[in-house]
Image (cartoon, rainbow, N blue to C red):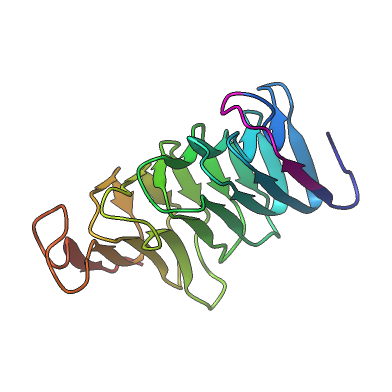
Amino acid sequence: MTSTTGNITLIANSSNTTATNNAGVSGTSNGTLTANSGSITIDSTSNKSSAVSLAGAMSAQAIGITGSSTTASTIVSLGAMMIVAGGSDLSVTAMNSSGGANTGITQTGAITVNADGGNISFASNNIISQSGAITMAANTSGNESTVLYDTTSGAKTTTITAGALTVTSGSTSGVNYIVKTLGAGIDTGVINVPGSVLLDNTYGGTAGAGGHTNFWIHYHCKF
């Protein structure tokens, strides 16, 4: 599906009681979505099936995906994504009725953000498994940007795995990297950002899965 001048908006509601059938919004690897002059917005609600299952590549000035389910084993599944130059942010949110160790977000394929000062956000109350390598344009916008992974609305089993992140050289403003869980494990790829890095698995002021109140806090600045 391609929109040459405007936006793409997909809204669905699936009441299917079988976990493997009839995702709210679904597509094959050939089912690409392109809105390079606008945004892609997906808002899907499901019961036991996935809310969003899109293997095909997406490209737009902004991408916002929200999936909500009751007990889905995988809430949101995505392929490669690109934010084009002149665009803004990429945001993915996936929630089950309860936090836990189901798959909230799974993502494969490269993520490219060519927007100056663009932000990336992955949030869920279930596991985030994001394996695609991320490349971001240098931030010369005058405002700091953020790459965020957040499962603090989940449980101590709600882990985060994040792909490698590279920011193109030449930034004059920071690109900050934040990964937060509620006591669950954190596993990241190689991180190269001109800003701060925070990995935090605090659980109510006590040690989380990594054995520390704060899993790791490290600051790195490189312009």
Can I make out residue 220 in this image?
yes
List the single residue furthest toward the left: 211
Q: To which quarter of the image does residue 171 belong?
A: bottom left
Is residue 16 within the magenta segment? yes
Q: Position of residue 127 (x, y in %)?
A: 39, 45
At a point 64% along the width and 39% down the height, the residue shown is 52
List the single residue furthest toward the right: 5
At a point 70% along the width and 42% down the height, the residue shown is 59
At a point 91% along the width and 50% down the height, the residue shown is 5
* 192 sits to left or right of 44: left
The one of 179 and 127 positioned closer to us in this rendering: 127
Q: Position of residue 144 (x, y in %)?
A: 47, 74
The one of 202 and 110 positioned closer to us in this rendering: 202
Quadrant of the drawing holding the C terminus: bottom left
Can I make out residue 170 in this image?
no
* 13 sits to left or right of 144: right
Q: Which residues are magenta?
A: 10-20
At a point 45% along the width and 72% down the height, the residue shown is 172
The one of 192 and 108 positioned closer to us in this rendering: 108
Is residue 170 within the magenta segment? no
List the single residue furthest toward the bottom: 142
Q: To which quarter of the image does residue 56 belong?
A: top right
* 49 sits to left or right of 5: left
Q: Position of residue 80 (x, y in %)?
A: 58, 35
* 76 sits to left or right of 169: right
With respect to residue 164, does 151 lie above or below?
below
The one of 60 and 210 positioned closer to us in this rendering: 210
Q: Position of residue 149 (x, y in %)?
A: 41, 57
Quadrant of the drawing holding the N terminus: top right
Q: How many marks?
A: 0
